[in-house]
């Protein structure tokens, strides 16, 4: 009897952790994030394809190493940063890019409103997969 209770508790604990996705993705609203992207990022970045604007395309961003879009003229700072882009690193970067990558040439002060970063990441996770 006791063993069954312990096994049951273990199973609940495993399910509890397995069923909770990463908070930055879970909390975000991709539809709102698309609005953030259109207002704040689209002038410099594409999310699919290989169009280079002022910044590199964000195509396939999740899992990409910083400074690695072929042919884009990155700053030395971004090339040397060695960041793997994903929900956690974007959560750190987007509120204040220059705090994470001093001397980046991304001319953007950062997203300051509560919820914007989570919404944008939810959008990017879905939109940059091609
Ligand atoms: C004024 C143009 C501009 C705006 C606005 C801008 N970026 Fe950038 N972004 C750049 C440039 C230029 C780089 C390359 C930076 C470097 O080489 O230091 C860059 C780099 C990046 C990178 C790293 C890409 C890589 O290949 O390593 C990410 C991620 C990124 N931007 C996301 C965003 C997001 C999301 C937004 C909107 C919140 C945004 N950027 C707004 C110009 C911009």
Image (tube, grey):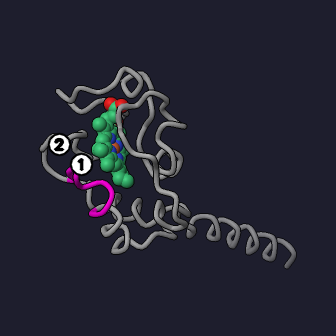
Q: Horizontally, is 125 left or right of 28 in the view?
A: left
User: Which residues lie in the magenta part?
Assistant: 38-47
What count of labels does the image hold? 2
Q: Quadrant of residue 106?
A: top left
> How far is the residue under mark 2 from the one under mark 1?
6 Å
44 in magenta: yes
In front here: 27 or 36?
36
14 in magenta: no
Badge 1 residue CB within 8 Å of ligand 1: yes
In front here: 17 or 4?
17
The local secondary structure at tag 2 comes to loop
Q: Quadrant of residue 99?
A: top right
In front here: 74 or 122?
74
Residue 45's disc is 1
The local secondary structure at tag 1 comes to loop
Q: Main secondary structure of the magenta part?
A: loop
Ligand 1 is found in the corner quadrant, namely top left
Badge 2 residue CB within 8 Å of ligand 1: yes
Q: How far across and how far down the image is residue 122, in percent?
A: 40, 64
Q: Is residue 63 visible?
A: no
Q: Are the residues at dot 2 and dot 1 in contact (C-beta closer than 8 Å)?
A: yes
**Which residue of the protein is positioned furthest toward the bottom in this rendering?**
1
Q: Residues within 10 Å of mark 1 (few under 14, many from 20)?
A: many
Residue 102's disc is none
Q: Horizontally, is 30 left or right of 53 in the view?
A: right
To which residue does mark 2 refer? 53
In front here: 38 or 81?
38
Quarter containing the N terminus: bottom right
Q: How far across and how far down the image is residue 24, in percent?
A: 52, 61
């Amino acid at each position: 009897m006791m063993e069954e209770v312990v096994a049951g508790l273990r199973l609940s604990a495993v399910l509890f952790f397995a069923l909770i996705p990463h908070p930055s993705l879970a909390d975000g609203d991709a539809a709102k994030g698309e609005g953030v992207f259109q207002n704040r990022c689209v002038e410099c970045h594409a999310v699919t394809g290989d169009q280079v604007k002022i910044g590199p395309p964000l195509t396939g961003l999740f899992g990409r190493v910083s400074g690695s879009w072929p042919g884009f003229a990155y700053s030395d700072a971004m090339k040397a940063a060695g960041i793997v882009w994903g929900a956690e690193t974007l959560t750190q970067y987007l509120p204040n890019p220059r705090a994470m990558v001093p001397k980046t040439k991304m001319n953007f002060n950062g997203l300051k409103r509560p919820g914007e970063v989570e919404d944008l990441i939810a959008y990017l996770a879905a939109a940059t997969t091609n």
